[in-house]
């Protein structure tokens, strides 16, 4: 039972390079999310996908794009990486419980932009 | 901006003691959740409390919610070294899919 799987776990980029973070879940959840976590801060929502075929901006979407490829997969793309995007990125999926979206997280992808 | 603010930022206690963490939030909510994050790992859901509930228990965890004060607390009783982690509250901001996390409380339990 893999849950939420993110790849890669670590990546170093130079400013201006592009890359895609991949995320897949095997729990048949409808909704998926991308968060970033910076030191001393909580998680900030970048984008989310409420259901297959839809995506919406979160708190900090600038510099990112997403694709909900199918129900299982939700990717995050950095078109032109900047040092400010150095962070740990978490993918999550959610199920409904008592009206709340309960999130299951991946292990994280640590990205460094030089 | 973040919806939830945890207090204290860091807490160090001895094994066997109780640990209390507080969370304050800004806007109306339908529910509030607490998550744990071990070092280098993703967050794990601990407990959910709805806005019409005042207290909820799960094992050694007790969560309270005071919607009039826009605050919640998480109590971990009889702490263990394995409880060492960061704890985050998360709110739904009144609905939708934008689950908003606070900055977290770092708990260190000394054996």
Image: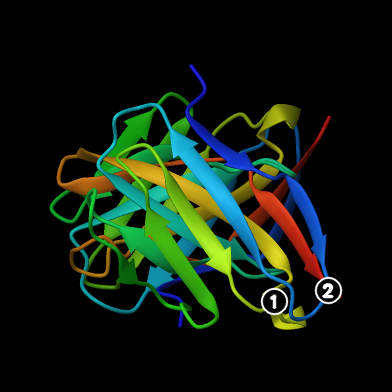
Question: In the picture shown, does residue A69 fall above or below B105?
Answer: above
| Residue plotted at (72% across, 81% down) | A82
Q: Position of residue B91 (x, y in %)?
A: 33, 62
Image coloring type: rainbow
Q: Position of residue A62 (x, y in %)?
A: 50, 83
At mark 2, the secondary structure is loop
At mark 1, the secondary structure is loop
Same chain assignment for discs 1 and 2: yes
| Residue plotted at (23% across, 54% down) | A53
| Residue plotted at (19% across, 68% down) | B94
Residue closer to the observer: B26 or B78: B26
Residue closer to the observer: A79 or B6: A79
Pointer 1 with pointer 2, Cβ within 8 A: yes
* Residue of label 2: A14
The quarter in which the N terminus of chain B is drawn is bottom left
Q: CA distance from mark 1 to mark 2?
A: 7 Å
Instruction: Kindly identify which chain the residue marked by label 1 belongs to.
Output: A
* Residue of label 1: A81
Question: In the picture shown, does residue B56 fall above or below B89?
Answer: above
Residue closer to the observer: B47 or A107: A107
| Res. B99 in view | no
For this view, does B107 lie left or right of residue A36?
right
- Which image quadrant is residue B103 in? bottom right
Sequence-wise, the earlier of marks 1 and 2 is 2
The quarter in which the C terminus of chain B is drawn is top right
Question: In the picture shown, does residue A97 fall above or below B106?
Answer: above
Q: Position of residue A94 (x, y in %)?
A: 32, 42
For this view, does B20 lie left or right of residue A82?
left
Q: Position of residue B59 (x, y in %)?
A: 43, 23
């Amino acid at each position: 039972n893999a849950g939420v799987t993110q790849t890669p776990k670590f990546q170093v980029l130079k400013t201006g390079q592009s890359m895609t973070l991949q995320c897949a879940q095997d729990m048949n959840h409808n909704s998926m999310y991308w968060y970033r976590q910076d030191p001393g801060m909580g998680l900030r929502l970048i984008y989310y996908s409420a259901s297959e075929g839809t995506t919406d901006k979160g708190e900090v979407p600038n510099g990112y794009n997403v694709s909900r490829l199918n129900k299982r997969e939700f990717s995050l793309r950095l078109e032109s990486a900047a040092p400010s995007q150095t962070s740990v990125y978490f993918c999550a999926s959610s199920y409904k419980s008592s009206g709340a979206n309960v999130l299951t997280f991946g292990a994280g992808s640590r990205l460094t932009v030089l | 901006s973040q919806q939830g603010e945890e207090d204290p930022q860091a807490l160090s206690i001895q094994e066997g003691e109780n640990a209390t963490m507080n969370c304050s939030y800004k806007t109306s909510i339908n529910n509030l959740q607490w998550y744990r994050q071990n070092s280098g790992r993703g967050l794990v859901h601990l407990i959910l409390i709805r806005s019409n509930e005042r207290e909820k228990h799960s094992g050694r965890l007790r969560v309270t919610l005071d919607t009039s004060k826009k605050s919640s607390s998480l109590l971990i009783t009889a702490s263990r070294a394995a409880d060492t982690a960061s704890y985050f509250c998360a709110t739904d901001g009144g609905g939708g899919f934008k689950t908003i996390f606070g900055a977290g409380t770092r708990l260190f339990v000394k054996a």
